Amino acid sequence: MQNALFDLTGRTALVTGAGRGIGLAIARGLARQGADLALVARTRSQLETARDEIEAETGRKVQVFPFDLADVEGVPSLFEEVLGVVGNVDILVNCAGTTVREPTEEASLESYRRVMDVNLTEVLLLCQAFCRHRQQVGKPGRIINIGSLACHAARPTITAYACSKMGVLGLTRTLAVEWAKYGITVNAIGPGYIATDLTAPLQADAEFSRWVLSKTPLNRWGRPEDLVGAAILLASQAGQFITGQIFYVDGGWTALV
C-alpha cells in the first residue's frame, strides 16, 4: 500500500532540461517509479545518452525531442509533436533554465529577454498546452516547476534570473488556483545550490563555495538526486492534495536567519 502511493506505472512524464543535471536526475527518478518519459533539451547527443541509460536501467519507454526552448513561438508545436509520438502526457516537469551573471546596470535587453523566455515564458506556454491536453482527455494532471532560492531572496548580478524565478512562483500559485477545477495540481521545487555542470564555475570559486556552505546548515552543496524525492511526491498519488506550494530542497538555507 505504501509503495502504491508513489507508483507511476502507466503514466508519461514530459521533462524539459532533461539532458543533464537536475532534469536528468528527476527524469531517471520518475522512470524508476514506473513512468514512461518524453525528454526535451537542446542537445541531441545528451538526450540520446540519457534515453539509452534510463531504458537500460528501468525498461521504461523514453522518447527524445531536441529543441531550444528559447524558441518560444515553437513551444506549442513541440507539445503537439510530443503528443503525436507518446499519445498522452500525465506529468509535466519544467526544468529547463538559463542565467546570465552580470551587473544589472550593464545588462542588455537581449540577455534579459532570453533568460525570461527560457525560464518563464516557455514554462507558461507548456503549461497552457498541457492544460488544454488534460481538458481534452478529461483527466487530472500534475505540473512541477523548478524554481530557485531566487523565489525566496535575491543576490547581486542575477536580475533576469531572479525576476524569472519569482515569476515561476507566481505562475505556479496562479495556475494552482485557476486549474484546480480541472484536477491539475501545480507545484514548484526550489533547489538550493546544486552541484551541476552549470554551477561548476561557482563551485570552483573557493570564496563563493565557502559562502554557500556558510549559508547551508547541512554544510554541503546539493546533488541533483536530492530533488528526486520531492518530484516523485508531487507527481504521484501521495501528492494528490498538494497544490500551489513550493518545496525548498536547500539543505536548510531558507530556514537560517
Image (tube, rainbow, N blue to C red):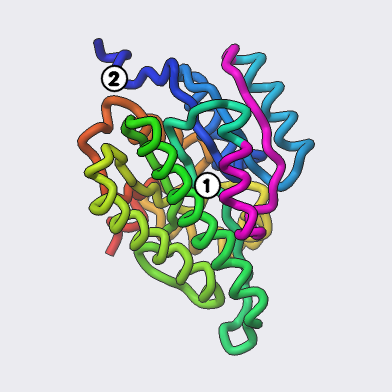
Q: Position of residue 73 (x, y in %)?
A: 62, 59
Assess whether residue 68 is covered by the magenta stretch. Answer: yes
Marks 2 and 1 close (CB-CB < 8 Å): no
Q: Position of residue 124 (x, y in %)?
A: 46, 56
Residue occupying the far right of the picture: 45
Q: Residue furthest bottom?
A: 105
- Quadrant where the N terminus sits is top left
Q: Does the magenta stretch include residue 154?
A: no
Task: Identify the image quadrant of the C terminus.
Answer: bottom left
Position of 2 relative to 51 (above/below) = above
Circle 1 — which element?
loop
Residue, disc 1: 95
Q: Which of 142 and 83 is in front in this view?
A: 83
Magenta residues (range): 58-81
Q: Considering only vertical position in the picture, is 231 above or below 151?
A: above
Q: Which residue is depicted at the point 33% across and 31% down? A: 138
The type of residue carrying mark 2 is Leu
Q: Which of 100 and 205 is in front in this view?
A: 100
Q: Which residue shows up at 63% across the image and 40% down it?
A: 40
- Name the residue beneath numbered marker 2: 5
Q: Residue at x 71, y 22 (%)?
A: 52
Q: Image quadrant of residue 207? A: bottom right
Marks 2 and 1, the one that precedes in the sequence: 2
Quick one: 53 or 89, which is closer to the camera? 89
Judge from the rendering whether residue 135 lies leftward or rightward of residue 23; answer left or right.
Answer: left
Q: How many marks?
A: 2
Q: Is residue 109 left or right of residue 175?
A: right
Residue placed most toward the observer, 194 or 163: 163
Q: Would you call the spot at circle 2 few (<14 residues within 10 Å), some (14-19), or many (20 or more)? A: some
* Amino acid of disc 1: Cys
Quick one: which residue is furthest to the front in this view? 136
> Could you tell whether 2 is left or right of 129 in the image?
left
